[in-house]
Amino acid sequence: MSEVKIIRLISGEEIIANYTENGDTVTLKDPSVLIPSPEGKLLLARWIPYANTEKGVTLEKRHLVFVIDPQKELAEHFTTVVVNNL
């Protein structure tokens, strides 16, 4: 089952995505990078915007530092803006 999660990669990037575990790999659907702004706001930008990620991006778990639940408001904003393409 897919859930909205925040994922930190070993590269330091923090991504919010619909997350599904598949054994030694994970699939990220609608991945977006979380970017803190100087005004204290959080911005979302498509992760690898030049690639077709409709079927998701599969990563090996060894590339992940941690996976955590986002705050409810962030998960709702992600779903409204990114997943529903508004």
Image (cartoon, rainbow, N blue to C red):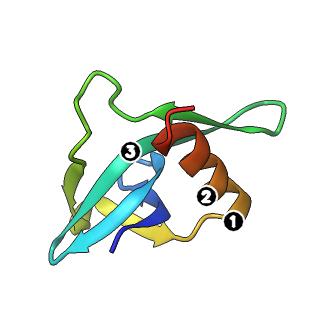
Q: With respect to residue 17, does 23 lie above or below? A: below
Total marks placed: 3
Q: Are marks 2 and 1 in contact (CB under 8 Å)?
A: yes
Is the C terminus in the top left, top right, bottom left or bottom right quadrant? top right
Label number found at residue 45: none
What is the spatial separation of the Cα atoms under label 2 and label 1, in whole angstroms?
5 Å
Residue topped by disc 2:
75
What is the spatial separation of the Cα atoms under label 3 and label 1, in whole angstroms?
17 Å
Which x, y percent locates residue 13?
45, 45
Q: With respect to residue 2, does 17 lie above or below? A: above
Q: Is residue 49 left or right of residue 60?
A: right
Which x, y percent locates residue 28?
31, 54
Residue topped by disc 1:
72
Q: Are marks 2 and 3 in contact (CB under 8 Å)?
A: no
Indicate the amino acid at tag 1: Lys
What is the spatial separation of the Cα atoms under label 2 and label 3, in whole angstroms?
12 Å
Q: Is residue 2 left or right of residue 56?
A: right
Question: Which image quarter: residue 31?
Answer: top left
Is the N terminus in the top left, top right, bottom left or bottom right quadrant? bottom left
- The numbered mark, 2 or 3, whose residue comes first in the sequence reads 3
Which x, y percent locates residue 29?
33, 51
**Secondary structure type for disc 1:** helix
Label number found at residue 30: 3
**Secondary structure type for disc 2:** helix
**Secondary structure type for disc 3:** strand
